[in-house]
Amino acid sequence: MSDAVRQIPFPALTPAQRLHIEIYGYVVLENLLTDAEISAITDTLYEIEDRFRTTGQMPGPHCFNTSTTEQFFRIDNLPHLAPAFFDYVTHPRIVGMAEEITGGPVRLQQSDAHIRRPVPEQDRRLGFHRGINPAYDHQENGLYHFSFIKALSNLTDLGPEDGGTTVIAGTHKVPADVPQEEIVAAAMEDPTMIHQVEAPAGSTLLFYESLIHAAGIIESDKDRLLILGGYMPTMFQAWNGYDPDIDFAATVSDEHRALLTGESKFHWPRKRRDLGAPAQVI
């Protein structure tokens, strides 16, 4: 793990990428991770699963499993568990994109890594959901900002049969008082609104947590590995179970500690630099 603070780019999204997420609620950035980063995360994730299945041992304190089935292994609360995980959630491009979307400095809200495998055909279904009300947004300098953004990176190539994350495009702005089941039913009638990620390994899906989305259906025989970080403005608390390991946080740089703990909350939204608007996209 390197705790040297790498410069966070701003703007982190091109005008075209910013317009895409504005309209559809998501954008895919191909090949954001290097081969070395992919290998480090992948090896770590398989090692954690192998150890758990052999001994029941967790990789460290303050982490938990959301799922341990043969078809779906997921470990939650990552930064202190392995250098590859820490480097991912503090990745300067990812943090930069999160800050651009929220409009100010962010804290890590959630982090998890998955190994997903094919399930029996009778159990294959899209579990569409959203994690936050679309109302938690604001407009500034002509751009849409939202309070919860996720970066999900696929560690394996995703073709049409490999179960890439699936979204109902544009639903990030549909109010919560519109029943979700009616939105999903309408999208099923017009599948052009349902988009599935297809991208090479190391690509990153950036999406608003208000976007209705689902894990894709794996129809191939390949494992699907992924890692994600969720980010919110610093005044928000971490989700239940995702509180940072304080002993670990004490060992990292001030900037990384602020990212993990949200300790800069009283300085939001302008702490480290001027977070003015990037070039207009429309």
Image (cartoon, helix red, strand yellow):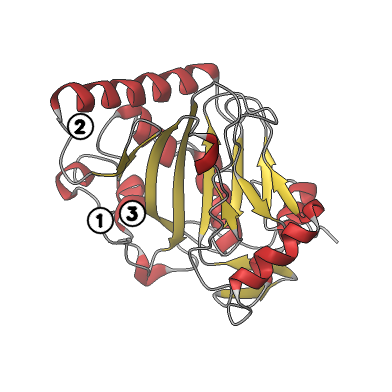
Q: Which mark is residue 97?
A: none
Does the residue at mark 3 contact the one at mark 1 (Cβ under 8 Å)?
no
Q: Residue at x 58, y 39 (%)?
A: 217
Q: Residue at x 61, y 43 (%)?
A: 205
Secondary structure under badge 2? Answer: loop
Which is nearer the N-term, disc 3 or disc 1?
1
Which of these two is toward me, 124 or 26?
Answer: 124
Residue 59 has which mark? 2
* Location of mark 1 (residue): 241
Q: On the rendered image, what quadrant is the C terminus found in?
A: bottom right
**Mark 3 and mark 1: span between their CA atoms?**
18 Å
Identity, as a three-letter code, of the amino acid under mark 1 = Gly
**Residue, disc 3:** 258
Mark 1, secondary structure of its residue: loop
Q: CA distance from mark 3 to mark 2?
A: 24 Å
Instruction: Name which quarter of the figure residue 240 lies in.
Output: bottom left
- Amino acid carrying label 2: it is Pro
